[in-house]
Image (spheres, grey):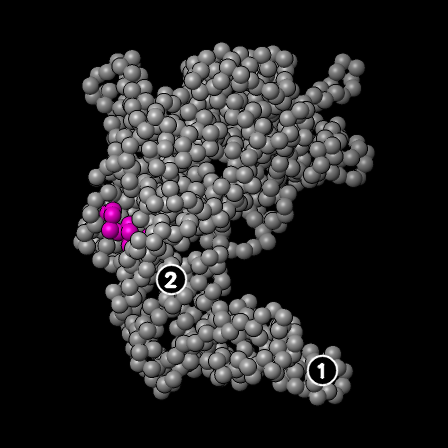
Amino acid sequence: MQQKNNENLNQITLSGQKLEEKSEYIIDYISGQKIKALPEEIDAVQIFSKRLVEEFGYPRAHIQTKPQFRIKASPSGDELYSIDIAVFSNDKKTYNNLFMIVECKRKNRLEGLNQLQIYLGLSSAQIGVWFNGQEHIYLQKILNKEGSIIYRELPNIPTFGQRIEDIGKFKRKDLKPPINLKATFRDIRNHLAGMTTGITRDETLAQEIINLLFCKIYDEINTAPNEQVKFRAGVDEPPEQINQRIIELFEKNVKIDYSDVFDKKDVILLDKDSIRYVVGELQNYCITEAQREAIGDAFEVFIGPALRGAEGQFFTPRNVVKMIVDVLDPSPRDFIIDPACGTGGFLIVAIEHIWKKLEEEGKRKNWSSEILAIQKREIASKYFRGIDKDSFLAKVTKAYMAIVGDGRGGIFCENSLKNPKEWSNSAQEKIQLNKFEIVITNPPHGAKIPVKGEEILEQYNLSKVWKKDKTKNDWFMTNKIRSQQSPQVLFLERCLQLLKPGGRMAIILPESLLGNPSHGYVVTYLRKNAKIIGLVSMPEELFQPHTHNKTCVLFVQKEVQKNDDIMFMSIVKWCGHDSRGNPIPYDEIPLVSSIYHSLYPSSEKNIKDYNRLGFIISISDFKNNILIPKYYNPDIEHGLNELSQSHDLVTVQNLIDKKIISIGTGVEIGKLSYGTGTVPFIRTSDISNWELKIDPKHGINEEIYQKYSKKTSVKENDILLVRDGSYLIGTSCMITKYDTKILFQSHIYRLRVLKPEILSPFLLFALLNTPIVKMQIRAKQFTQDIIDTLGGRITEIILPIPKENNQRDKISYETKRIVTERSELRQKAKKILIEIASIGKLSEEEEELSTNL
């Protein structure tokens, strides 16, 4: 198992290197060619190319993107029009075999329609598509008896091998999982906002889409594989007929069967043309098999970060939910709760997980299908609970639970953080503290949405003021209650309160909460009240583009933590989508659960069997109350172990203690001081590896320099290293004889070698730029407020100093030569530029500037 996981990791890591490169080029999905990363390529051409292959089933061999297929502007003309995506009826790709044209250049709908009609009229293609990444037009070209051309819009394009007239004639088994539901919902949202009369607000549109989604989900679940689905829009069907079928599905099935969820007054308000559009967009897909939670995706698109994000709510991707449920592996008769259930994603996946176990149990016990169905309904209604303070979200979860398998009676609209005695009687009856075997949740995050009010805060130890005992390096709680606390902190404690002894929990938290020194009291409380099972670090892209909040998944068990206990850690780099929310082919999240079960709870530790996606550490290995997986990255230990035979492994703190080096920081002078003189003021952006790039715009005057120079003085061969920022942290340069009259920012360290006879400054500079040290710097930076910082953890960095004198001397010599040569070349270049600018003898001011530079 572990070997297989390592192979998967290596494959993803090697492929993923392409994603880390900041390039102006991308790889075309169809041709595989390297192309310019133009907006229309990223947002439209590549997305629709992938949909053609993976959703509509067209072979790549039938599609041409690069080089672009061209059609003549007229039968005798020389002008040619380029087609963004050309789809052919076979792999010959000739003019007569052209079946479909996809136009992505025109951003405006009217322009796109006009361009599409021109291209269709000049070609043999039957189908035309305009798609700009946000909305679309599907068009069919029809030659009438008189020989003229007419156009009609289609509800969708045909799948590969399907006749145009058969669009919408789907059996349940024909439906395919969607590739990018968010893109589909964006398309629907933009169309409805621009074309629907009387309904323009996103909140109202969201309600309409949710109603239609429940019709879709109900139809999928209640239609046999060989039966035709009701949620469809045929190409020749009048909109009135489609409208009637969908309205009946909602009124006579969804509302009647789930009358306790949907009110009698609930109706679908969209007009018949809008319903046809939405049904046409969704009819190909099997929503219940989507990789992401469909209801949550719809909310994010229609209601958006402006409303949901303001409350710290971001819906959890389905791959993360499934990983969490697979790790916890709940049993059929475990009481399960999500106290911030949103649209019910965690509960739905947990039900699916448990039903698989029930089906296996039914096979062993030879249950009939009727008995199995009864067991499933009983499990859903008796053992599943959800709470959300948003009444609409609670209602959506009720409906989702009801349609998928009952359990609607366990969903409540309450504030989970309030005293349970303030909940409704029915909620108090079905939800008690210390009752649940499983708690799974992604609570609201954010310091901008604090919880206030003594009646809530007095329930929690984590709402008290905690202080740090520096002598014991530990935190202790006082009796003073804070005026406010972040919701994620209180949810952590409430979730532990909900667990019964021995119960297990998974909660998504900001990574800074478990690694920021100012939150050390949270980790102290956690370690004293629970056994930490595991921690999975998620990539920053997970909740992008809505928030850059870097998160982790914390797994705990409600029992006493022992020093010889172990915990599982994982560092996930790829989550299946990029920072824009668009799908990418790299997703490590599904690997985590299988790696977890192969390693935990085994106590055997052999570091050669571990990688960043799965490794075990002992509780006794915890340092400084830091619960961030990258801090314990096994790749670092691997690298240091390999170097230990030929290198002395020395910490920066050890060099400080022996007075071999010293470390200082810079100052802040205020932006009003910029540009007041010619003395360079160095900021983090002015430092690149091996060089100091001085920006004259930020020069300061002599008075400011003299005021701060004693505190931040630099000498030749000092090293400046960035301590705060983001990707710049760890970037360094050496001070040469040309750079000694400068001031530098407080976000920068100054490292000075005090005993060069023991440690050459050039050797130290080279060591700071080695991959193993860079890896340590990345592992030890954490988020402070909104920026990342290395903080005081620089002293923990281990430097691999070569044991051989000759090797140390060689490294020092080569590093000094490179630094000196580059600084001399830089001075020559600057003097040339000054001479060109002055065209003659330099003035005294220019001479001074030249010297300073």
From the viewer's perspective, is 187 left or right of 778? right
Residue in view at x 28 percent, y 44 percent: 556
Residue in view at x 58 percent, y 70 percent: 670
Front residue of this view, candidates 437 and 818: 437
Task: Name the quarter where the N terminus is drawn.
Answer: top left
Q: Which mark is residue 685?
A: none
Corner quadrant of residue 325: top left
Answer yes or no: is residue 283 visible.
no
Q: Position of residue 460 (x, y in %)?
A: 32, 45
> Of helix, strand and loop, which one carries label 1?
helix
Q: Main secondary structure of the magenta part?
A: helix
Residue 205 higher or lower than 787, as above or below: above
Which amino acid type is shown beneath numbered disc 1?
Glu
Range drawn in magenta: 521-531
In this view, the residue farthest toward the right is 76
Q: Is residue 530 magenta?
A: yes
Name the residue that disc number 1 marks: 835
Name the residue that disc number 2 marks: 780
Residue in view at x 28 percent, y 51 percent: 525
